[in-house]
Amino acid sequence: MATFSAAYASLLLAFADPERWRRFGVLAAAFALLSLDDMVELHERAGEQVFGDALDLSENVSQQLEVFLYAPLFVFALWTVWTLIGESSKEVGRVLMAGLSLLGLAVALEIGGLVTRPLDDDGVRYVNGARLALEEASELAGWILVATGLTALACTVLPRDVG
């Protein structure tokens, strides 16, 4: 839902800023697709087929590499948000930067599963669980902050057009 909130905030920006409605509309669509992916696990299924079945990689490796299937979309969306930091107030820019940083941390922690999943299989139970908890918490907080920053940005754009 936090990812969808970022999509919704981007859609608000598309309506609030007619000069850049395409940019924000595409960003809203990208975030909506990422949100859908979280709900129905598109990249997990595709990753299993590509990395597991087609390339015959181990389940541990294929589960960690699946994140790269939607990397271009993720990078595009986050790059677009990154460009908004310079166009925002200092406060909004900080919120967006914190959100992007947490999302980057979540990706790094996801890839870190290459190390922690085998430990879990070897009986070292809490390392992978701790990594997973930190990854999910970072992702959730990151999306919340991105959605908050985009909403705040929409609130700064709207008053210009009202008066």
Image (spheres, rainbow, N blue to C red):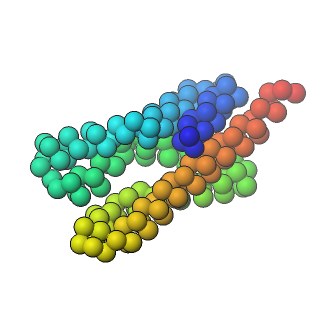
Residue 150 lies in quadrant: top right
Residue farthest to the right? Answer: 163
Position of the C terminus, as image quadrant, is top right
Q: Residue furthest bottom?
A: 124
Question: Who's the residue at 54% across and 52% down the image?
Answer: 140
Picture residue at 49% right of the left edge, 41% below the top: 77
Q: Position of residue 161 (x, y in %)?
A: 80, 27
- Picture quarter with the N terminus: top right
- How many labels, in total? 0
In the image, is 161 to the left or to the right of 81?
A: right
Rendering coords of residue 82 (x, y %): 55, 49
Front residue (pair 86, 112): 112
11 up-or-down from 72: above or below: above
Query: Can you say whether 94 is above or below 78 in the image?
Result: below
Provide residue 110's location: percent of width, then percent of height: 38, 58
Residue 66, given in percent of the width and then of the height, sits at: 29, 48
| Left or right: where 40 falls relative to 153 | left
- Please, is residue 120 above or below residue 96 in the view? below
**Residue 95 visible in image:** yes
- In which quadrant of the rendered view does residue 108 lie? bottom left
Whether 4 is drawn above or below 75: the answer is above
The residue at the point 82 percent across, 33 percent down is 159
- The foreground one among 104 and 58 is 58
Left or right: residue 140 versus residue 109 is: right
The answer to which image quadrant residue 109 occupies is bottom left
Which residue does the image show at 19% across and 47% down from the upper left?
A: 51
Would you say residue 87 is visible in this rendering? no
